[in-house]
Every structure is written in structure tokens, then in C-alpha cells.
Image (cartoon, helix red, strand yellow):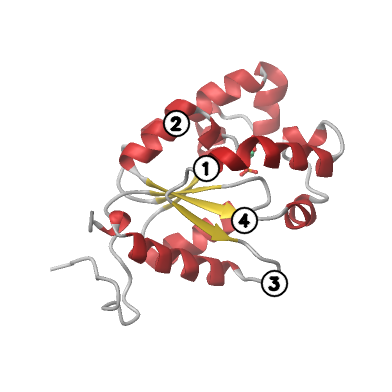
Amino acid sequence: MNQAPRMGETHGAVPQLVRSVVLIGLMGAGKTSVGLRLAAALGVRAIDSDHEIERVSALTIPEIFERYGEPEFRALERRVLSRLMNETPSVISAGGGAFMNPKTRAVIRRRGISVWLRADLDLLVSRTAGRTHRPLLNQGNPRKILAGLIDERYPVYGEADITVDSAPGQTHEDMAAKIIEALLAHGRAVGER
Ligand code: S3P
């Protein structure tokens, strides 16, 4: 029988997910890369909500913003995440703005477990530098934009079930291991409450 291990009983075993783990955080926090490592370690599917939005719309994120505007992108993001939250337990890397939507937040809270990858401004600036696929960061000085988003979003991200700090020099594997430890301690993702 495949039972979820309890704290202190894992001996390197992986917990069996009973609900999806949703990685949230700002652009550059490492949600997609850490999500892939975490999903591999847990033996579940890794899904990136932005990739899913691009797949269903057959457009890139910049194209959606350009042709239909941010509100349409947000509507699509909300629909895609609600659907994903009804599917088999997976690791879902959510776009940075997804958790800001109250309905999306509610569905994640009800059906999943949220993990905030918290990173400071310098780390986010260095990780997003030179990338052009994020429409919000192409609208001015990325440092200023990210600083504004930290002020606006971090109080809301703080409602996540679990917070894990992302530090420079930490590998994606380190982050995945920290998340697994936190998931086991929290219990809800592995069916303990
Ligand atoms: C956004 C983050 C992006 C993407 C879109 C908007 C945001 O995803 O969804 O460009 O509002 O923070 P990542 O956080 O995966 O870069």
C-alpha cells in the first residue's frame, strides 16, 4: 500500500501528494525550474500555468498582452488555474500574478497547497535581466517595476500555506528538498490533515 510517510519516517522516501502543490512568487523566483525538480522528486506531473495558457490559446504571453490586453490574460489565467486545480495532484508553477486574483487564491486554498518562493529584489532583478518574454517588465525600469510588485504582492503572497526563501547560490535541487521538508512538516499536501 502506498501510504504517505509521516514526519521522521521518510528515510529518503518521497511523500505521496494528495493535492496539488502550487508554486507562487514573483517573476524570477524560480517557480518553473524548481517546479520541474520538485515534480521529478515527487514523481508527479510538472505544469507551468503560463505554458498551459500558451498551449490553449496558441499564442505566446506577449502576444496575448499585445492583442487582447492584460485583463484578458488574467481571465484566461484564472480559468486555466481553476481547471488545473481539478486535475490529478501535480506541481503547478503559477504565473506571478495568478495568486493575486481572489477567486484563484480561493480555489488554490480549497484544493491545493500554496508554496511561496520568496526572493529579494536583487535576486529577482538578476534572474530576470536580459529576458524579454515578460510583458510587465518591458514597460520601464525592471528594478522599479519589481520593487513596486514586491510592495503590492508580498503581503498577499504571505497568505500562502508555506513560504520558502530563495537565496543566491542555492540550487533548484536545494529548493526542491526544502519544499519537500516543509510539505511533510505541514502535512496537508500528503494527506495528514
Ligand atoms: C506575470 C508573470 C509571468 C506571466 C506574465 C505576468 C506577473 O509569469 O504570467 O508575464 O504578473 O507577475 P512568471 O512569474 O512565471 O514569469
- Label ID, residue 30: 4
Depth check: give the residue in front, 163 or 90.
163
Residue 172 percent coordinates (x, y):
58, 67
Discs 2, 4 touching: Cβ within 8 Å: no
Q: CA distance from mark 3 to mark 1?
A: 23 Å
Numbered disc 2: secondary structure? helix
Residue at mark 1: C-beta within 8 A of ligand 1? yes
Numbered disc 4: secondary structure? loop
- Label ID, residue 41: none
Residue at mark 2: C-beta within 8 A of ligand 1? no
Residue found 86% across the figure and 33% down from its top = 140
Depth check: give the residue in front, 149 or 97.
149
Discs 1, 2 touching: Cβ within 8 Å: yes
Q: CA distance from mark 4 to mark 1?
A: 11 Å
Quadrant of the picture in which ligand 1 is shown: top right
Quarter of the image where the C terminus is located: bottom left
* Residue tagged 2: 104
Numbered disc in front, either 1 or 2:
2
Sequence-first disc among 3 and 1: 1
Sequence-first disc among 1 and 2: 1
* Residue tagged 3: 169
Sequence-first disc among 3 and 4: 4
